Amino acid sequence: MTQDDMKKAAALAAIEYVGSGGVIGVGTGSTANHFIDALAAIRGRIDGAVASSNATAERLKKHGIPVIDLNAAGSLKLYVDGADESTRHLHLVKGGGGALTREKIIAAASETFVCVADESKLVDVLGRFPLPVEVIPMARSYVARELVKLGGEPVFRQGFTTDNGNVILDVHNLEILNPVELERIINQITGTVTNGLFAQRPADILILGTGSGVKTLR
Ligand code: 5RP
């Protein structure tokens, strides 16, 4: 079974959390794309979806799923998205695709956050995957210096602009033993929009595609 097969199995398993009526939140990335493709088959069950990126909005529209502005949707019952890393406490690193800010907003506005991933994403300690930090462009060097003070090695994501018009610093060499605290500290650096730690609002359910079937952690 390939890594993509495992992503797809996890995404398909998340379909059972989609209720009837209402608007759901949909994330970004290859695992979320599998979820969107499966959602198309039951699109009549929902009123629409809030997209965490322009790419996701385009894919939803292609499948005939109405894309709804979060401001018009109110609070969401369900958000389904992938992750770059997760612990057993369902603290996540996200933002490999650069959509972390909208993803964090949708996660905050959702009652239940179902994270879908293949088994390689489950780790004991977060930080091997470089932590994405979305930054206002003029603050890039200042924020990078502050991240160095925290022990990280920020690398500017060359040639990439977020859907919000900002830039990304990918912070290497962090061993994140207290994700709730680090999320708070990095978000306090002036010029930071947000960082890819999802620990203050972790996932509620993690569906992992594995070589021996789908496993669910709560
Ligand atoms: C995008 C994300 C994605 O959820 C994360 O990068 C996982 O991607 P994939 O499902 O392709 O492995 O946070 O910003």
Image (tube, rainbow, N blue to C red):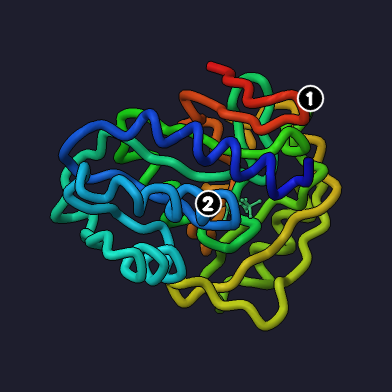
In this rendered view, identify the residue nearer to me: 112 or 173: 112
- Is residue 169 visible in this depiction of the protein? yes
Residue 31's place in the image compared with 54, above or below, is above
Image spot of residue 160 (x, y percent):
62, 77
Identity of the residue drawn at 60% across and 61% down: 97
Residue 18's place in the image compared with 218, above or below, is below
In this rendered view, identify the residue nearer to me: 189 or 212: 212
Identity of the residue drawn at 63% across and 39% down: 117
Identity of the residue drawn at 25% across and 31% down: 19
Mark 2: few/some/many CA within 10 Å (<14, 14-19, 20+): some
Which callout, 1 or 2, points at the residue further toward the start of the chain? 2
The amino acid sitting under disc 1 is: Asp
Image spot of residue 41 (x, y percent):
34, 50
Q: Residue furthest right?
A: 173
Identity of the residue drawn at 51% across and 56% down: 33
Q: Which mark is residue 34?
A: 2
Q: In whole angstroms, how far apart are the C-alphas of marks 1 and 2?
A: 26 Å
Q: Secondary structure at mark 1?
A: loop
The answer to whether the residue labelled 1 contacts the one labelled 2, judged by CB atoms less than 8 Å apart, is no
Residue 37 appears in which quarter of the rendering?
A: bottom left
**The N terminus - image quarter:** top right
The amino acid sitting under disc 2 is: His
| Residue position marked by numbered label 1 in the rendering | 124
Left or right placement of residue 174 versus residue 182 in this view: right
Q: How many numbered tags mark residues here?
A: 2
Image spot of residue 96 (x, y percent):
65, 57
- Is residue 105 visible in this depiction of the protein? no
Image spot of residue 123 (x, y percent):
77, 30
